Amino acid sequence: MRRPLHQGQTPRPLQEKVTRKSWPQVPHGDGSRRWSGSRSRGATPVSPAGKASAEAGLIGFDVQRGAAQRLSIRYLDLVLESGAGLTQLIAEGRVRLTRFGLGGLSPVNVPLAGKLTVVGNRIVIDFGAQGIGGNRNTTAGNWYYRLSVDTDRNGSFESLRHFYRLLGDTNGDRTVNAIDRNVVNANLGRRGANLNADVNRNGVVNSTDQYLVRQNVGRVLASSLPLDD
């Protein structure tokens, strides 16, 4: 309400009430939009752009150096955008492995102590000559696995990668069947490294491989479970 004028006073023009909402929002270089105008008038920044997702740090994942088979798994390779801080990431326990049944149930943590090393911008997980599970001649490592990485160290482990091991699965199609038997039979006597038909990974395809496939026919990984390699 305006006060009454005294004698000799002239009326002053009405001033428009300026509020923060009357100022335009302008884009800023970081992708956010803020109120323009002086902060002395009460202008406050609109919510700034969010932090980059942790997923941006993990750019590659490889199981057993590109092999199709899931008979035995010794190596996992995680490729990140940079090698900076990877040793600390490992030391802080920010890489975790969980195993599930082939149907995706009953999670159990898998210890990784002593199995992780840094090579450039990669974290290499080496399960040793007997592979994941500790015995390449048995079904001890037959599980569905989830690898979780907390790349931004916020405790949420957003970066997830999934894979499996299935003794007898020579072609990586989630099942052990007649196709796998035929692969082994067609390669009997062959020698060499990383042969898909070499079920127990001892460098030769022989009757032991035939036996291992035969013993595992019918084992299947659930088709609904996601895989990342």
Image (tube, grey):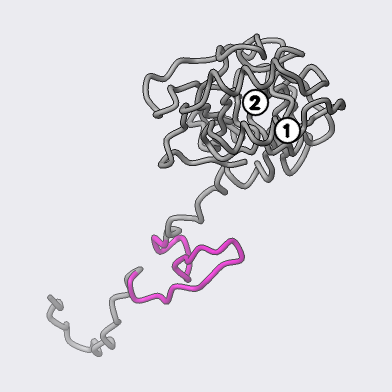
Identify the magenta region: 21-43
Instruction: Check the picture and name the quadrant holding the C terminus.
Output: top right
- As measured in the structure, the alpha-carbon distance from the residue carrying label 2 to the one carrying label 1 is 8 Å
| Image marks 2 and 1: residues in contact by CB distance under 8 Å | yes
The amino acid beneath tag 2 is Leu
Asked if 93 appears above or below 159 in the picture, the reply is: above
Residue beneath disc 2: 71
Instruction: Check the picture and name the quadrant holding the N terminus.
Output: bottom left
Asked if 58 appears above or below 145 in the picture, the reply is: below
The residue that appears at 77% across and 27% down in the rendered structure is 188
> Closer to the camera, 106 or 112?
106
> Closer to the camera, 67 or 159?
67
Viewer can see residue 207: yes
Q: Secondary structure at mark 1?
A: loop
Which residue extends farthest right?
A: 192
Rate crowding at label 1 as few (under 14), some (14 to 19) or many (20 or more) other CA atoms within 10 Å: many
Viewer can see residue 88: no
Where residue 4 appears, as percent x and y from the top left, is 12, 80
> Closer to the camera, 70 or 98?
70
> In the displayed structure, does residue 214 sit left or right of residue 8?
right
The residue that appears at 69% across and 38% down in the rendered structure is 68
Residue 34 lies in the magenta stretch: yes
Q: Quadrant of residue 45?
A: bottom left
Residue beneath disc 1: 196
Q: Secondary structure at mark 2?
A: loop
The amino acid beneath tag 1 is Asn
Residue 13 lies in the magenta stretch: no
Where residue 226 appears, as percent x and y from the top left, is 48, 41
